[in-house]
Amino acid sequence: MIRLKKGTFGAVSLGLAAAVMLTAPMEADARRKGSFGSRGARTYDAPAATNVAPRQTAPVQRSMTEKPPAGAAATQAGAGAAGAAATAKRGGMAKGLLGGLLAGGLIGALLGGGLGALGGAGAVMALLQIVLIGGLLFFLFRMFRRRSAAAPAPAMAGGPHGATGSAFSGFQPQPAAAPAPTPMGGFAAASAPQQLGEDIAINDADRRDFERLLMEVQDAFSSEDFARLRERTTPEVMSYFAEELSQNATAGRRNSVAGTRLLDAEVAEAWNEGPVDYATIAMRYESIDVMLDRSTGDVVEGDPSRPTDVTELWTFKREPQGQWRLSAIQEA
């Protein structure tokens, strides 16, 4: 057994700590964390996975959109189960009643409990009674079957809004004939779960708007330009940006974002809710994102010499006769 001399243990511990600090990756990104905003009726649903963001993205965490009642799905499922049980009960009662009549009639006839029980005439009457009872049973059986068929089918839980893994039918964005070279990757359509709202097509003009908004929002946030942010975001997202900028200012810091470049993008979901359009886009982009000391300009977080690669889901909203505006951001 090797024994360490006095003082050696402390030296070894310091050496190990230094090695861990040198080998551990340092945080080189000062960007915001979490997710916020609104995706309309889909705010609390997870967006569809894409090639750009293949992992399941969590629903929006901070939102002013009211959550749907927690027991709505359970209530619907309970109603469906109760309807199925009632239908099964009707079927069981019908079968039991018909079986009882059949058994009782036949036994009564064979034991002579009918119109006649002795002699040849009694036998003929017994057979006639069996035929009459059989006709009555057939009539009752047909009546019960018609009633069961006319009963409404029970409501099934997990309809279009609750289904997962299915694709939008006919969800095909309009392809650009000859797209101009841009830093974006292929803006392809991905499979998305069927949810509230009808799917819409995303054309090349929409794609250019999404890329432009990515650049302009990042630049306006870095410049702390409230007017430009207000023009390009919904009031809810603007309130979150204003809160973050205020917190940075209170802490004596400023978030600088430069060199934003879109590397790849893909449509996750695109739909409308009445006259309002929504589009959730998986975006992978790079930028130099650092936190600066507000008074000295020194870097306090991030690496000003190395751009960071990040993937986020940005949801855009378009009012009637309006332009696309940023309405939610989610970490992918």
Image (cartoon, rainbow, N blue to C red):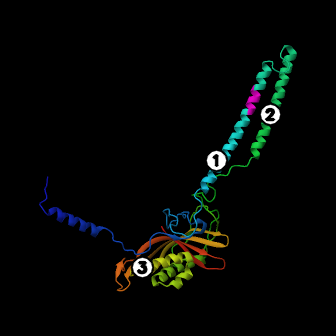
Q: Position of residue 243 (x, y in %)?
A: 48, 77
Q: Residue furthest top?
A: 119
**Residue 165 picture quarter:** bottom right
* Residue type of the residue flagged with mark 2: Phe
Which mark is first along the chain, 1 or 3?
Answer: 1
Horizontal placement of 77 versus 116: left or right?
left
Q: Nearer the viewer, mark 3 or mark 2?
A: 3
What x and y, as percent, mark residue 25?
33, 69
Query: How dense is the environment of label 1, judged by Cα within 10 Å: few (below 14), some, or many (20 and up)?
Result: some
Residue indicated by mark 1? 81
71 vs 7, left or right, is right
* Residue 125 horizontal side relative to residue 27, left or right: right
Q: Residue at x 49, y 70 (%)?
A: 312
Residue 322 falls in image quadrant? bottom right
Q: Which residue is mark 2?
A: 138
| 288 relative to 145, above or below | below
Q: Nearer the viewer, residue 195 or 168?
A: 195
- Residue 285 falls within the magenta-colored stretch: no
- Front tag of 3 and 1: 3
The region drawn magenta spans 97-103
Using the image, tell me which numbered label, if any, was put on residue 248. 3
Q: In the rendered image, is residue 274 in sight?
A: yes
Q: Position of residue 8 (x, y in %)?
A: 14, 63
Amino acid type, callout 3: Asn
Using the numbered discs, state the Cα–Cα distance from disc 3 to disc 1 in whole angstroms: 53 Å
> Please, what is the three-letter code of the amino acid marked with disc 1?
Ala
Q: Secondary structure at mark 1?
A: helix
Foreground mark, 2 or 1, reads 1
Task: Name the one closer to the observer, 283 or 155.
Answer: 155
- Give the farthest residue toward the right: 121
Mark 2 nearby-residue class (10 Å; few <14, some 14–19, many ≥20): few
Tell which residue pokes out farthest to the left in this image.
5
